[in-house]
Amino acid sequence: MIDPSAFADATTLLARIRSGETRSRDVLELYLDRIGRHAWVNAVVTVDEDAARAAADAADAARRAGAVLGLLHGLPITVKHDVEVEGMLSTYGSTYNRDHVAQQDAASVARLRRAGAVIFGRTNLPEFAADGQSYNVLHGVTRNPWDPERTSGGSSGGSAAAVAAGMTGFCLGSDMGGSIRIPAAWCGVVGFKPSWGRVPTSGSAPVPGAAAFDATLLPNDVAASGPITRSVADASLAFDVLTAAAHAATSSREGVFDTRQLRVAAWFDDDRSPVSDASMSVFDDACRQLADAGVTVVRTRPPALGLDRLEELFELMFMADLVGHSGDEAFAGLIDALSHGEDWMSRTHLRAATLSHRDWLTLEAERNGIRRAWNAFFADFDVLLTPVAPTTALPHDFSEPVVDRRVVIDGVEHPWRPYLTRWCGAVGVAGLPAISVPVGSDSAGLPVGIQVVGPRQGDQRALQAAAVVERVCGGFQVPALVAD
């Protein structure tokens, strides 16, 4: 029997807490029980029960006294293991940080806490968030709540699995090339990567070999922090808190979209990352449902925005930024490893790691041109729909190195990456807001997520359109394996 409280979205739970229908402590105990009862998922891997119970009790006492601590008053939530949470282990999934306890909250975490959230646990990820699956020596393997033989994705796989399994109110994740959006799609929940710079990313757990000035505290120009939730309404609420600008206008198109006013472009075709037949059937159904509801849906490809070059530019710029923050020893080791690779990814990353400043400026000029092209595109359309990933959740594959992994889709073999990340990386390199919204299941019963992309800094527009997609196409469903 499904426990409705465990799978209620955060917006609903907050209303119940504020009205006194339920207590923060009750919700916390429910989540703690579910984490233990469905331990096989292995999503929430670090828990501070004593501190969380004290915080939940304090929130309940404050409510009884007539005080409200903020928009998230008393809501128990989790945070991915790559972000600092004061007084809790922040391992980044690595033995390097086995005993690392953060001395202060990351900026994003501090905003959640000031809004009244009860932070009770940390979710799993690959070591240093460097894989499309969530497993590491310290915390083990996170399994997909829909099928334990399949991955929950990476790098925010523990976060998405915890939300899908009803183990948290929502989870704070991080994303560069799809680390929020792909796990959300594969676990059937909502994942929001805001426009670059909207949510602070300072306060990452330390990494070995970081430069002496502690560059781990500096945001790069691709990474974003954002929420993984069970509804678009929750993602919007979390975004308000994380931007410290509740209800502020961030787009030129304010208010809730009427379906008949919404203009949507849909782009699902790419030769190097073709969408599986099973997923394409779901995308086609979603477009038909939206059109039947009165949404204007145009199947098109944005002019002058080829996915090949967008993906290549993403790989060059994010890797160049990462190596710029590494120490000499780590940099030398990376160059040695990349020099022996003959695949496209290794060659691209080797070029990125050895870019001159002039080369970087040339790429930045190209990216600015791409941003202008996106701006022109979004003058004609409110949002763009794309795949989040070209297929649904894959079986676990822990073979190393990652660049040697292969996946067979509809009888054709593809490299694990960039095949799986091209659609997310293409919009991420320009800093666009993008939301993964569940829109159905494939023929194997696995969830399919569609990516709703908005113009740069048009986060509210993207959220409003995503709410329409969610309402028309179905939204979150409870995985049968964790329904009890």
Image (cartoon, rainbow, N blue to C red):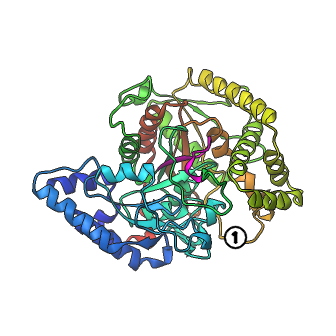
Residue at the extreme front: 212
Quarter of the rendering occupied by the C terminus: bottom left
Q: Nearer the viewer, residue 51 or 235?
A: 51
Residue 53 found in image quarter: bottom left
**Which residue is rendered at x = 66% and y = 61% of the image?**
131
Residue 46 % position (x, y): 45, 72
* Magenta stretch holds residue 220: yes
Q: Secondary structure at mark 1?
A: loop
Residue 442 found in image quarter: bottom right
Image check: 280 left or right of 476? right
**Which residue is rendered at x = 72% and y = 42% of the image?**
317
Residue 353 % position (x, y): 79, 48
240, above or below 302, in the image? below
Image check: 163 left or right of 428? left
Residue 14 % position (x, y): 25, 53
Q: Nearer the viewer, residue 389 or 409?
A: 389
* Magenta stretch holds residue 158: no
Residue at the extreme left: 65
Q: Which residue is mark 1?
A: 397
**Span colored in magenta:** 216-226
Image check: 422 left or right of 432? right
Q: Amino acid at mark 1?
A: Asp
Whether residue 142 is visible here, answered yes or no, is yes
Whether residue 413 is visible here, answered yes or no, is no
Residue 376 found in image quarter: top right
**Which residue is rendered at x = 32% and y = 58% of the image?**
8
Residue 385 % position (x, y): 57, 38
